[in-house]
């Protein structure tokens, strides 16, 4: 049964080796964080969600999911509430960059040439770009010039049609979706036992001035830690999100990678 | 139900905050690796096992388990077979040191002063020492002088009585236990679905000369990747190990930390 | 005459010292890049523009402008065309982070406690956040706890009313404004000799898929290097932008900093 | 008009590309600092002067001038008065080394193989050497073996005949020329509005013991910050300096680089 | 006479060059520390002993001994007493790793392909592994793929027969040999003037719990700093050790390296 | 007898502790290199000479000499011939900076507040400055504000009277003294067995253009590796140098440090 897994670390190495042989299998690396997500959700939302999207993408492409990065870059006030919350546990930028560089270099050593970073924590974005750039530079020094790395954040695949269904009262931007309808709906659908919607705090959307300040003003962030109210989240919206994001991700991978498509076989 | 968890990242932040308030709760940080463990076991053995010991320790002490480090330092030939196996995916020393330093600093920011690194991957050992030393230095610069960090590798708690039971034909040292009776027995007891004992390769214990060589000679490592045969592993031996290690760990924590003992309450 | 300058490096040190004494003077640090900006504009647009906004802010607040950072982080395809263009000359993330950390620490050594990073290059954003975080950490280790750093990108102060005037045919987002109407209009107003609008290449707005790929596909970027057409740029629009951004910035500074307001005196 | 510029960042990228094509054009990178230069001069003297020498060299060789480094290494007491003055704003060594390494690597990416570092701040010297060494090492790893980097500090081109004219009362060494006759004369000739010679403090040449001490003794440095009196500076001496240094630099470049000489065409 | 030396730094460079020409000469790099070794021994024991073993190995193989590393990684409580003793003077891990990486890269630049790290300080072990790994990586980037590095700690060559003679009352493990019979006997044989055996403190072997704690508990370490009593040390035991270790080392080198054997010629 | 040593690492730790107690004892840290010094001298001249000056200074001041740094920064062409010679074995700048920072921090941990870096290798100079600056910064973060570090290069204490005696035919500057009369005379006096003056190559003083080039032109350096001829060196000149430098150094230390003067007692 475990033999059917798409999680690379659940395989014995000979099985891993036979799966990645030839290099035509995408490797998905989920990057998350340990970050507060309001009163109603646990702090590893940003690990669970990209891992699930990575799993679905791996199933569809015959690929494998690498172990997730369980810690990420520092929570920023306008996208994650700020790094001053108890529980939020973050890495310095250089630590994240270097760890990602190492992991990319290692998967390339195994012969993989198609890597996909599946990001679940907005603040990781630029350090992912840097980690990849440094890894590809080192790979070139090693004479390896054909590694391709796709980076995606699942929410970027939500299209206008889905937005209209998800936010009938109007969409205010991904930036304040921290702990809001997007993440809560997905969690309700995937990990309902981990969501206590009754504890969610209803509040107007966070409004921030057009600049940042350090150290942050804690009072800018709603006291609950979410940036928009999760009250309108539902498992049904989670289904919509799972569907649109998974389809979008698989379509992107078909464009960028070469693999034996598994969709028909599902 | 999730409210009963000892996994810190499964808690909403207000619950986390109330648990760690006062600082008298140990935080357990499991450090693992993605490393080949022979033909019969998956590659995240070194994550699963310390996480389980951390969980048991947290239950006993009222503490919390931080998200595990899913990647570790490079596999060394005499303790892990060597870093040349496909699948083994490792960090540079500095990457591990800095990430651990960051995480310790963050847990201290939350008010925690009792941290326990639960190591599952021998090669992490010295980089753990360095990460802690650098973190404590920075904490002192911040005026925090009362952080205590305990580091333990669960196998160090196996006593002679247990060894006699586990290795009736003679014990050859922890150094060649990679993928052998110790780890396999624990996995058989805890995650039997993840072990395919029938695929385990029987071979004489690895013998190494009294020096190291880089790049390694692959032929020094048994072809299966394990350093001693797992054939004599059993779930019963796993029970012995779980028992002796958990008791030893809890005893150590009682000596070093102050917490409200939960054992009676179990 | 030079005595009236707001550029800190144009002052002799005793004059600088007397200006910053007491710490109630904001220091503005412009961060730019050397980056291609299409066929019609030079490559230091991202230095010139934030320096001008910093100058205006310094005039209004009695503050001083530090020397600009003339190089910035690597151009990203969806916001700057990509780092593969000849001429674009960029820093690794760590180099930018560390240099900014050093400069902040030095201005704090002079007694300044109100610093404002004026960013002109989108890609610098997260490395600015990291540089500030590391600088504030070191300042705390030095016993300095009252430094405040405001970060702003001038385009974030363009309000809806201005957008309506600037983009009567519809606004497509700041992300594709690289070398477009925003920057070109400002340059036409401020440095008309440096703009060759007749060389500007008209093209439809760049459209990118919802993911990134490394190494980038050069063909995703319009061949000219701009991400939207600058053809509708004008000095008049530059006036609108200068006005709305300067007013917005000064208003933000009044909220965050304490200084002797110079607006009436202008 | 701007089309005639030799400042690389003032060009649109296609023009830059056509100028550097073939690699036979030297790129000049000025390295300066923000450093006190006495009561009579601004703090960016070390940026302005090497930029001007770079400009002249670029005109003569058909080359281009890169954006200057506006911050440099920490002022040392015996050559710059010490890093304790308000206004002096410096980088750690590693920050300078890494930024220079990055910029060299980028100019090489554009196809340039003839780079010239024009240094205006003595304290940068050894970190320049290190930055170049690391850059050339990385370029070799990239398979690029033909990059040549010339490093020059303009004052090293002042010959004995010029010294006799500049210092009729005797020359005491470049080491104490900080803010003295050399720099002041050049500034009087090039940027007279930025010099307030009447504010210059006359004092005997600084005398230092044959060792260094950290933290420095501020009283070792003349209170004005200059290490020798600028009183005998003059625009005429500036002409002598401009002439001898420019000729010396161009001669050096003819020896080391291959380019289409522009002198006759001037 | 000096011409007969095996210490590389005692040679003029042309002699060094002629010795290493062809690359078939091993280079031995001793790594030590400045670390307390009890009341009866000096603090450079970990430099003197590996240097002597390196010297003997160089004599036997026609090789050369590089200058020793005089500082090493931080003393750990269970193997060196702990880094809190006055006199113990240690490096951060990264400092040791990078310095070793540099030195390996330089010896490879001279054409050497057979390097042997002779370690005298247990705590250096893992940082040696990392330094070598990073050096070999950089050498591969430089196109050098045939460098071989052997790492040895002399005590690993003591066989059971020797142990029986050295510890007739029973051997308790190398881990607590810090300042004990092993090192003291060797010093008595090689540097008797540096040992004051009458000042040695007799004490029962150190006993440590099966975990580590940071900051260390000083009371865990015997007050003298040694971890086992040196009272039974003797020059005769030193002879046994010199003999068994030297023979073992030379045998290892014969297996791993190719060189013109000098043993017959001795 | 060894008890009389001034070499810190030759002492047992309790003796070290009693010597440094009270902090009024200077600690001398010699910094050298492994660098070619012509055909007639070994490659550790830059270690031997500063160590001897440190020893003399320690005798005079009741201080202690730390283990020398046996490797230094890369040889530069105009001061050491260049780093391309076989045998020359150098560190990257950051490696030297960080190792020195660590060692200073450790000696301060022992309670020492008077440190003296005795440099024997010109190229180390600026990296010493940086290492000290970073160490003092970290010590301030630790609340230690009274550490004083003196840096000296012994040749800077040669006065004009001595120069007249040493170079009757005219002195051409310390910059080309590499392997010349200065170092050779000192070695002839201190380590005559290590000098083969008959192998010294006589050649005119090296002449360099007023700029540097990387990679260096090997032909700029005299083929022997020395920058001026050592032919006029003599043990008598060594006596002059030992005398003038030692007196100068002790005088400097009297000015900067507080200690119980030992000169009368000699």
Image (cartoon, coloured by chain):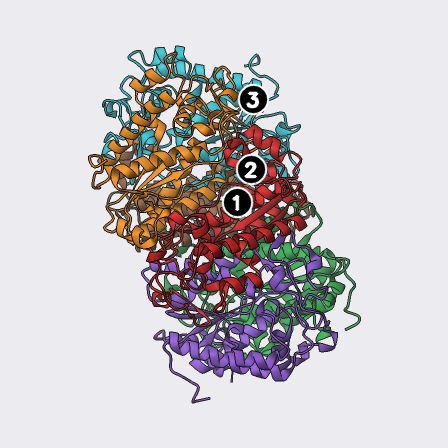
Chain colours: A orange, B red, C cyan, D brown, E purple, F green
Q: Chain of mark 2?
A: C
- Give yes or no for contact between labels 2 and 3 (Cβ–Cβ under 8 Å): no
Nearer to us in this view, B135 or D136: B135
Task: Return the mark for residue D182.
Answer: 1
Q: Quadrant of residue B144?
A: top right
- Whole-percent x, y for residue D197 in the image: 58, 35
Could you tell me how far apart the alpha carbons at marks 2 and 3 are, in whole angstroms?
Answer: 27 Å
Q: Secondary structure at mark 2?
A: helix
Name the residue rendered at 53%, 25% in the picture: A39
Nearer to us in this view, D169 or F186: F186
Task: Return the mark for residue C135.
Answer: 2
Q: Secondary structure at mark 3?
A: loop
- Whole-percent x, y for residue F226 in the image: 46, 70
- Whole-percent x, y for residue F134 in the image: 59, 49
- Left or right? Give the position of E102 relative to C215: right
Nearer to us in this view, D115 or A199: A199
Nearer to us: label 2 or label 1 = 2
Q: Chain of mark 3?
A: A
Quadrant (top left/top right/bottom left/bottom right) for the N terminus of chain D: top left
Residue position for label 3 = A223
* Picture mark count: 3
Q: Residues within 10 Å of mark 2 (few under 14, many from 20)?
A: many
Q: Secondary structure at mark 1?
A: helix
Name the residue rendered at 35%, 11% in the picture: C164
Q: Quadrant of residue E236?
A: bottom right
Residue A117, compared with residue B225, is above or below; it is: above
Nearer to us: label 3 or label 1 = 3
Nearer to us in this view, D181 or A171: A171
């Amino acid at each position: 049964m475990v033999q059917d897994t798409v999680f690379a670390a659940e395989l014995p190495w000979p099985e891993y080796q036979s799966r990645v042989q030839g290099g035509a299998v995408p490797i998905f690396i989920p990057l998350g964080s340990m970050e507060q997500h309001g009163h109603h959700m646990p702090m590893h939302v940003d690990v669970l969600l990209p891992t699930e999207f990575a799993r679905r993408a791996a199933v569809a492409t015959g690929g494998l999911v690498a172990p997730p990065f369980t810690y990420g870059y520092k929570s920023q006030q306008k996208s994650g509430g700020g790094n001053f919350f108890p529980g939020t546990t973050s890495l310095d930028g250089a630590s994240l960059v270097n760890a990602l560089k190492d992991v990319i270099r290692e998967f390339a050593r195994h012969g993989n040439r198609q890597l996909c970073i599946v990001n679940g924590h907005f603040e990781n974005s630029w350090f992912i770009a840097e980690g990849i750039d440094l890894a590809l530079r080192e790979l070139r020094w090693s004479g390896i010039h054909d590694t391709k790395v796709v980076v995606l954040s699942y929410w970027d695949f939500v299209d206008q049609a889905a937005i209209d269904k998800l936010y009938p009262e109007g969409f205010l931007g991904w930036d304040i979706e921290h702990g809001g309808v997007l993440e809560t709906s997905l969690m309700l659908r995937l990990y309902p036992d981990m969501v206590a919607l009754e504890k969610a705090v209803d509040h107007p959307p966070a409004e921030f001035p057009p600049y940042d300040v350090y150290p942050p003003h804690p009072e800018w962030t709603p006291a609950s830690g979410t940036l928009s109210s999760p009250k309108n989240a539902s498992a049904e919206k989670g289904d919509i999100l799972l569907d649109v994001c998974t389809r979008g991700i698989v379509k992107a991978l078909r464009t960028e990678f070469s693999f034996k498509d598994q969709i028909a076989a599902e």
